[in-house]
């Protein structure tokens, strides 16, 4: 008889008078394999003569051939038409019916299966046959109808162990794990049958599905008592169960004690490691498989590739791809899908597209994976194009489903995608997908991300049975996308409905409190976290750290950080970005060094935060070292890192290097153009800014709001008022960009510096938005510079009314009066400031030498090398005095004697930093200093003359712009 893939006819496997059911020993990678049992059909007790077998062969062979070719209706018709043929014996007919039932299950053809079932019921000799009814139970379960399996089982007059096993297997296969366990309990407690090596793997699979390791241990104990634990299939099931439940030590213990292991054993162990995030151990087992002489199969590959995808380990993914080709597995659909998914999730979308194009046997998983890849990349047009192509597929097995919708939605992240989001929502509603909880929750989240909070709430209120996940989708969306106050309201509604928050709910609450700066409420939630022992959860801990950082409580954040055990990369990133956000660059650099020494490899987010710290300090040498580190670690291809590198060079006053880096970039997007434009702007290179702006447009890039901030800043720093106002007007008229407060703040500052105070005030009054304190403080500073006390007093009152708790506002008002020598008013303002418990920020400057940053406070004589610094300044002061330097005591806004004012000027922090640089740096080296406040007129004049006297460039970055002093001239042309 020709070799076929269906189970051989029952007459070939006679063993007992009570025949067992038919179970295929071939299992998919994600099911618990059955024990090595004999193939289960038998019919007759006596062997037929050879000539009789030859007569029977054509009938059974014909049925088998029809089944093999997938022609089940013809096979059924042949059986029905030949039912009266007396030349076909009952055992042979039974074999044929058994073969047809098996193939119906494999093809999931329940309609043909039902007709076969009806035929069996009509044939009285087969109606209560153990073997055929066992096959019926199995067929219905394979077709996804365990209720029919149960109906067959309950309709029998009597049953045996194999029928019980088939029913337990039916429930487990269809993920009705409670029913599987209940049936197993009935088998043990209500019958005399003893579970065997097929029963236990099915029950263990149910325990795994329920994540009930306690019950799993009881079944394990039963296996030990029954001496079945050494069976390879029982062992495989136990390894899989312990692995899925997260008890890896138990899984390893079972695996190591197994007397016999097959490939499924190794695959089960790999799956256990991979599901618990142990990627290195998973890869190690792959190597061991090859060492022991086994060949990985499709199950091995599709278990390992998702690990590569989750870890972004493209190198290992490529190695496994090569192994797939070598083993001839690349045509397997599951393998092809897993490879495509791996490449897409590792960011190699073009490779995924290539595999997708080569795949001529696509199923719904293929399409969903490819759509997910485009969606994650933010390629909205590509995502929806694939969705349309998928809908045009004629294959009945390729239909849009809930997973498709879930994969499309991540592409909808911006307001621009709201129309597309509504289209996909309508499609989902039309096809009934909106009833799925995951889909509904995903739409709630997507609408919040697209800025449509009303639609998000509309979808939420339409969910009939709201779960914690439903509330989380809305609370998280509101907290992250513009309405944290409402997020808190919905949290209270969730509590009122009787639902308890989970980790995600609490994380979202902390985020809402962080946005609203509600520290007191955040502390109450923190107390709740402590009471419930949730602080050790890394997600909660990181959310807490972020809350304290947003509320400016860096010491509380530090305390939490250093209490954490096993800090994740996200935790380090949170602290690094927190230090940078709060203007603590020294602490950020120290933490980065600590991170490296602890063996934690930084990635793009950490590097970006440290570049920001270098930018704040204008620490060029440290920035260059970090740039080299990023190059060696292959991190500079990331757009955010590229922007950070440019920003670091620009804010270190090294625009030549910034421009070189920019010129060498292959793909320059708008963000990179904006950074280099802003860099030239703060360094006073207005003509270069306008040149870059024109070039950018020639290349087809459209400017955005950030582009115009850079242009207005550049015009502001060089006094190009008419040009700046021209671009402000063109923003709206020509480029259809609505100016925001940031743009108006630049324009007001530009007019104010030019002395056009009335025009600046008119622009403020004509603005479509209410001016904020930045605009009023800028205008007040201009009033002081140009001696307009009357307007300054009006603006000062507005400023103090808006923000009475900010020390710098009082300082500006005080300086206004001091500039007009109104010392009584100065005293009054300072007393009011003192009454609020506010203190002026001291002038502070930084200089980097040999990779270390040194800090100087104004008037600080406690520096270890103060005497040497003071001596250096005396020598420098003598030199520049010969060049015409005279201390400008009008910069000292205190009622002091002239000599006291001169002494105050000598203690300015930038003078101390420059003197320290001259003391420590080699001749001719550029001195780079950063200052937290605006450089005063006296220090500005002194720095110009110092650059000429010592013949070296001095670069000072204050809180407004850069000053490049060279040969006695400043790049600002004394306009700042």
Image (tube, rainbow, N blue to C red):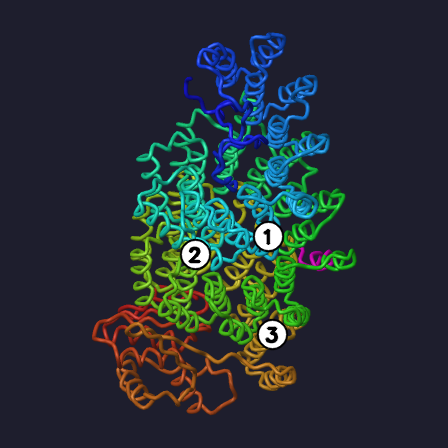
Question: What separation in Å lies between label 3 and label 1 (alpha carbons)?
Answer: 56 Å
Q: Secondary structure at mark 2?
A: helix
Q: Nearer the viewer, residue 575 or 95?
A: 95
- Which residue is labeled 2 in the image? 714
Q: Position of residue 221 (x, y in %)?
A: 56, 56
Q: Is residue 627 left or right of residue 711?
A: left
The verdict on residue 486 being magenta is: yes
Q: Is residue 915 left or right of residue 194?
A: left
Decide: few, some or many residues near mark 1? Use Cα within 10 Å; few <14, some 14-19, many ≥20: some
Q: Main secondary structure of the magenta part?
A: helix
Q: Which mark is residue 962?
A: none
Q: Please indicate, yes or no, whether residue 447 appears anywhere in the rendered image.
A: no
Q: Earlier in the sequence, mark 2 or mark 3?
A: 2
Q: Secondary structure at mark 1?
A: loop
Q: Please indicate, yes or no, whether residue 455 appears anywhere in the rendered image.
A: yes
- Which residue is labeled 1 in the image? 211
Q: Nearer the viewer, residue 536 or 905?
A: 536
Q: Nearer the viewer, residue 636 or 351?
A: 351
- Which residue is labeled 3 in the image? 806
The verdict on residue 375 being magenta is: no
Q: Quadrant of the N terminus?
A: top left
- Range of magenta residues: 483-490
Quadrant of residue 864 in the image? bottom left
Of discs 3 and 1, which sits in the foreground? 1
Q: Secondary structure at mark 3?
A: loop
- Residues tagged 2 and 3 counted as in contact (Cβ below 8 A): no
């Amino acid at each position: 008889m020709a070799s076929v893939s269906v189970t051989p006819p029952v007459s070939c496997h006679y063993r007992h008078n009570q025949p067992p059911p038919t179970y295929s020993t071939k299992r998919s990678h994600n099911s618990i394999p059955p024990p090595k049992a004999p193939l289960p059909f038998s019919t007759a007790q006596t062997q037929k003569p050879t000539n009789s077998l030859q007569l029977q062969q054509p009938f059974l062979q014909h049925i088998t051939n029809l089944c093999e070719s997938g022609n089940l209706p013809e096979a059924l018709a042949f059986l029905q038409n030949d039912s009266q043929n007396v030349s076909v014996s009952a055992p042979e007919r039974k074999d044929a019916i058994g073969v047809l039932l098996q193939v119906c299950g494999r093809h999931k053809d329940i309609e043909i299966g039902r007709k076969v079932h009806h035929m069996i019921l009509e044939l009285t000799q087969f109606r209560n046959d153990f073997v055929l009814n066992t096959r019926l139970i199995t067929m219905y379960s394979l077709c996804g109808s365990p209720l029919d399996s149960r109906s067959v089982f309950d309709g029998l007059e009597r049953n045996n162990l194999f029928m019980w096993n088939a029913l337990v297997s039916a429930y487990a296969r269809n993920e009705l794990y409670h029913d599987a366990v209940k049936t197993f309990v009935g088998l043990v407690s209500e019958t005399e049958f003893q579970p065997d090596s097929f029963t236990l793997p099915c029950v263990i699979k149910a325990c795994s599905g329920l994540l009930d390791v306690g019950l799993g241990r009881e079944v394990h104990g039963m296996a030990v008592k029954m001496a079945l634990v050494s069976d390879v299939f029982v062992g495989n099931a136990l390894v899989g169960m312990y692995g899925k439940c997260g008890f890896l030590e138990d899984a390893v213990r079972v695996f190591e004690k197994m007397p016999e292991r097959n490939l499924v054993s190794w695959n089960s162990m790999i799956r256990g490691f991979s599901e618990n995030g142990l990627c290195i151990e998973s890869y190690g087992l792959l190597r061991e498989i090859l060492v022991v002489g086994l060949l990985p199969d499709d199950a091995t590959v599709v278990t390992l590739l998702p690990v590569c995808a989750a870890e972004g380990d493209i190198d290992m993914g490529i190695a496994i791809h090569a192994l797939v080709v070598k083993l001839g597995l690349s045509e397997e659909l599951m393998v092809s899908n897993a490879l495509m998914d791996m490449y897409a999730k590792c960011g190699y979308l073009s490779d995924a597209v290539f595999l997708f194009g080569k795949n001529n046997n696509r199923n719904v998983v293929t399409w969903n994976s490819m759509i997910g890849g485009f969606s994650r990349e933010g390629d909205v047009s590509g995502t929806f194009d694939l969705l349309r192509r998928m809908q045009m597929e004629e294959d009945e097995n390729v239909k849009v489903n809930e997973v498709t919708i879930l994969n499309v939605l991540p592409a909808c992240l911006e307001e621009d995608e709201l129309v597309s989001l509504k289209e996909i929502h309508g499609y989902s509603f039309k096809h009934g997908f909106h009833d799925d909880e995951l889909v509904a929750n995903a739409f709630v989240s997507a609408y919040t991300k697209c800025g449509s909070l009303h639609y998000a709430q509309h979808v939420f209120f339409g969910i009939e049975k709201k779960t914690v996940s439903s509330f989380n989708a809305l609370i998280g969306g509101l907290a992250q996308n513009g309405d944290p106050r409402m997020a808190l309201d919905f949290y209270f509604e969730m509590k009122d409905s009787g639902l308890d928050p989970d980790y995600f709910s609490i994380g979202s609450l902390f985020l809402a409190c962080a946005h609203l700066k509600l520290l007191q409420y955040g502390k109450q939630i923190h107390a709740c976290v402590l009471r419930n022992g949730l602080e050790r959860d890394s997600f909660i801990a990181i959310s807490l750290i972020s809350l304290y950082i947003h509320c400016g409580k860096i010491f509380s954040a530090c305390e939490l950080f250093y209490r954490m055990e096993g800090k994740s990369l996200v935790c380090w990133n949170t602290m690094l970005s927190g230090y940078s956000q709060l203007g603590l660059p020294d602490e950020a650099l120290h933490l980065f060094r600590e991170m490296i020494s602890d063996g934690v490899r930084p990635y793009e987010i950490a590097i970006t935060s440290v570049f920001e710290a270098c930018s704040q300090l204008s620490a060029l040498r440290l920035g260059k070292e970090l740039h080299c580190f990023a190059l060696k670690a292959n991190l500079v291809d990331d757009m955010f890192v590229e922007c950070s590198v440019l920003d670091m060079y620009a804010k270190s006053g090294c625009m030549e290097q910034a421009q070189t880096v920019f010129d060498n970039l292959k793909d320059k997007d708008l963000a990179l153009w904006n950074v280099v434009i802003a860099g030239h702007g703060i360094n006073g290179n207005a003509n270069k800014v306008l040149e870059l702006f024109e070039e950018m447009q020639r290349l087809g890039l459209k400017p955005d709001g950030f582009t115009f901030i850079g242009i207005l800043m550049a015009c502001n720093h060089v006094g190009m008022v008419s040009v700046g106002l021209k671009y402000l007007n063109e923003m709206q008229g020509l480029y259809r960009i609505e100016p925001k407060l940031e743009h108006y703040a630049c324009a007001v500052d530009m007019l104010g510096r030019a002395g056009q105070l009335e025009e600046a005030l008119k622009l403020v009054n004509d603005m479509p938005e209410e001016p904020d304190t930045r605009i009023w403080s800028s205008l007040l500073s201009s009033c002081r510079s140009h001696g307009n006390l009357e307007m300054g007093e009006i603006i000062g009152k507005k400023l103090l009314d808006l923000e009475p708790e900010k020390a710098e506002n009082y300082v500006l008002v005080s300086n206004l009066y001091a500039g007009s020598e109104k010392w009584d008013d100065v005293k009054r303002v300072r007393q009011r400031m003192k009454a609020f418990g506010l203190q002026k920020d001291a002038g502070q400057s930084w200089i980097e030498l040999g990779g270390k940053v040194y800090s100087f406070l104004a008037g600080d004589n406690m520096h270890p090398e103060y005497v040497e610094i003071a001596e250096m300044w005396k020598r420098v002061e003598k030199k520049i005095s010969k060049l015409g330097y005279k201390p400008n005591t009008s910069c000292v806004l205190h009622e002091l004697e002239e000599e006291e004012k001169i002494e105050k000027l000598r203690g300015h922090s930038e003078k101390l930093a420059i003197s320290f640089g001259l003391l420590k740096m080699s001749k001719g080296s550029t001195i780079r200093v950063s200052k937290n406040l605006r450089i005063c007129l006296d220090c500005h004049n002194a720095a110009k003359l110092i650059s000429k006297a010592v013949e070296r460039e001095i670069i000072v970055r204050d809180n407004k712009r850069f000053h490049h002093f060279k040969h006695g001239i400043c790049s600002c042309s004394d306009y700042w």
